[in-house]
Amino acid sequence: MSGLAVWVHGARPRTLGASLTPVVVGTAASGELIPWRFVAASLVGLGLQVGVNLANDFHDGVRGVDTSQRLGPPRLTSSGMASPKAVLAAALMSILVAGLAGLALALATTLWLLPLGAVAMLALWLYSGGPRPYADVGLGEIMVFLFFGVMATAGSAYVQVETVSSAAWWSSVPVGLLAVAILLANNLRDIPTDEAAGKRTLAVRLEEQRTRTTYRVVIAASFAAVALGAAVEALVEGRGLPALALLAFGSIPLAARPLREVGHARGRALIPVLVGTAVLQVGFGALLAIGLWIS
């Protein structure tokens, strides 16, 4: 690969749905659409997602975590497709784009978004950087749930109507859980190389079988959260999810293959599980958003 194709590869396009899905769902939960704010929120999400992908590429490359034994797609730094300096510059540029879009949203709504954005950027960097990256101590899934689930979904709702409804809070849970499932699938594949490099991800700590079980529980919990939210709304109006949010269950067929294959696949055979989970999140999010929008 050369030129633009290198950077498209480094951005990991298969994972970018994890940054756009909460924006779409949060906007739908708000019940309003201010187009430029939607675009700006999408740029925040994409900028942070690409930024964390490239920062992870840079940090794991220079620390020697990514090696020729890596089972996933080659990374820019470790493979030599781009210099560490160039990868770092691209990561910082992506974060800058997110920051500028976030600044525009803060000026239009509330300046309290600025410290929240700063925390998100710090979390992005410390995922695999700093003296003790939190991905190495098994906290990556918690942070992904918070920042690519709760904060991204609720924040996208807020910038539209400057309040966060119960539907937005409820929706943030399955969106975040599916982002966690993507990371679990990725880290399950990388257990052998991460363990050899001393990277103690949650998957390394749980070991293979318990990680496979955790993945399935997280997927099931994503659907259960929608059902529970709809049940709460039926009991107390305005406190849960509208009944049409159950349209998200239409994405169950997309879950069938990754749920089946995660039970036995190993190494590179887990890549379809990762891709399938990313597709599931997009399909789930799209159907959930449709249900929320038309309610």
Image: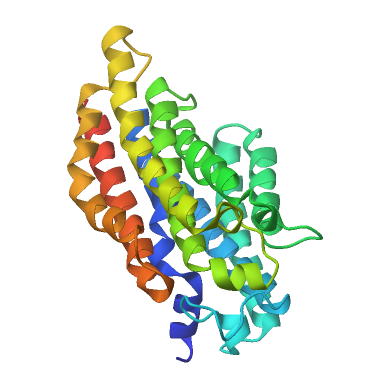
Q: Indicate left or right for 172 with 130 as reference.
A: left
In the current view of this chain or complex, which residue is farthest to the right? 131
Residue at left offset 50%, top offset 36%: 150
Q: Position of residue 204 (x, y in %)?
A: 59, 59
Residue at left offset 21%, top offset 46%: 251
Is residue 51 visible in this depiction of the protein? yes
Residue at left offset 48%, top offset 77%: 71
Q: Quadrant of residue 276?
A: bottom left
Q: Position of residue 146 (x, y in %)?
A: 56, 40
Against 234, residue 283 (above or below) is below
Against 120, residue 229 (above or below) is above
Q: Nearer the viewer, residue 269 or 19?
A: 269
Is residue 241 visible in this depiction of the protein? no
Q: Position of residue 83 (x, y in %)?
A: 66, 86
Q: Position of residue 254 (x, y in %)?
A: 22, 53
Q: Indicate left or right for 97 with 232 as reference.
A: right
Q: Nearer the viewer, residue 263 or 139?
A: 263
Residue at left offset 19%, top offset 35%: 247
Q: Quadrant of residue 169?
A: top left
Q: Nearer the viewer, residue 51 or 254?
A: 254
- Indicate the quadrant containing the N terminus: top left, top right, bottom left or bottom right: bottom left
Against 108, residue 75 (above or below) is below
Q: Nearer the viewer, residue 253 or 36?
A: 253
- Indicate the quadrant containing the C terminus: top left, top right, bottom left or bottom right: top left
Q: Quadrant of residue 79?
A: bottom right
Instruction: Name the colour scheme.
Output: rainbow
Q: Indicate left or right for 33 with 112 as reference.
A: left
